[in-house]
Image: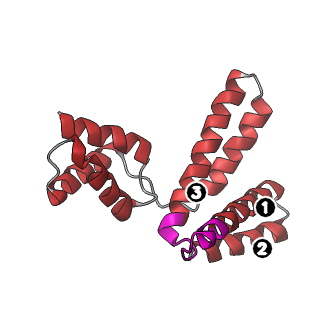
Amino acid sequence: MLRDDINTAVKEAMKAKDERKLSTLRMVNSTIKNADIDARGQGKPPLSDADLLGLLQKMIKQRQESVELYDKGGRAELAAQERQEIAVISAYLPKQMSDDDVKAAISAIIAETGAAGIKDMGKVIGALKAKYAGQMDFGKASGLVKAALTG
């Protein structure tokens, strides 16, 4: 399980005295625990690995936005710190699909679901998330799905 991999990495980072990796992994664990608490409060089970992948992608996206802001603000040291965190978190995501693979997956899902128009976009995105969690940027995929369904 992804949780076990992250906890093992925390122990390894402690032994190696890798402060950046350790603090990033502790932050990831904290985010996971908070999400589990939220889920429990809603009567749901703890997050599955697929849910955790989505959570990690969200964390990466937040850091990418921070990098842009720090770069614009001339804060190179903070941008570098965020990039290091992105690298640590990215290690726990599956290999990302290429743009061509994403387009092929979208075409296949549209064919599978029989989506005919923009009203079927939610069905297509849901199927993509179920099948390719953590392997693609669903923000970009959403635009591609919309283009495929309207064009």
The structure residue drawn at horizontal position 55% and vertical position 65%, both measured from the top left corner, is 52
Residue type at numbered disc 1: Leu
Instruction: Judge depth for marks 3 and 2 and give the one in front.
Output: 3
Mark 3 in CB contact with mark 2 (< 8 angstroms): no
Mark 3 in CB contact with mark 1 (< 8 angstroms): no
Question: What residue is pinned by disc 2?
Answer: 11
First-in-chain label (3 vs 2)? 2
The image's colouring method is: secondary structure
In this rendering, would 67 be left or right of 130? right
Query: Which structural element holds mark 2?
Result: helix
Picture layout, residue 37 above or below residue 68 = below
> Between marks 3 and 1, how big is the CA–CA gap?
16 Å
Horizontal and vertical percent position of residue 100: 29, 44
Question: What residue is pinned by disc 3?
Answer: 56
Few, some or many residues within 10 Å of mark 2 (<14, 14–19, 20+): few
Q: Which mark is residue 22?
A: 1
Magenta region includes residue 40: yes
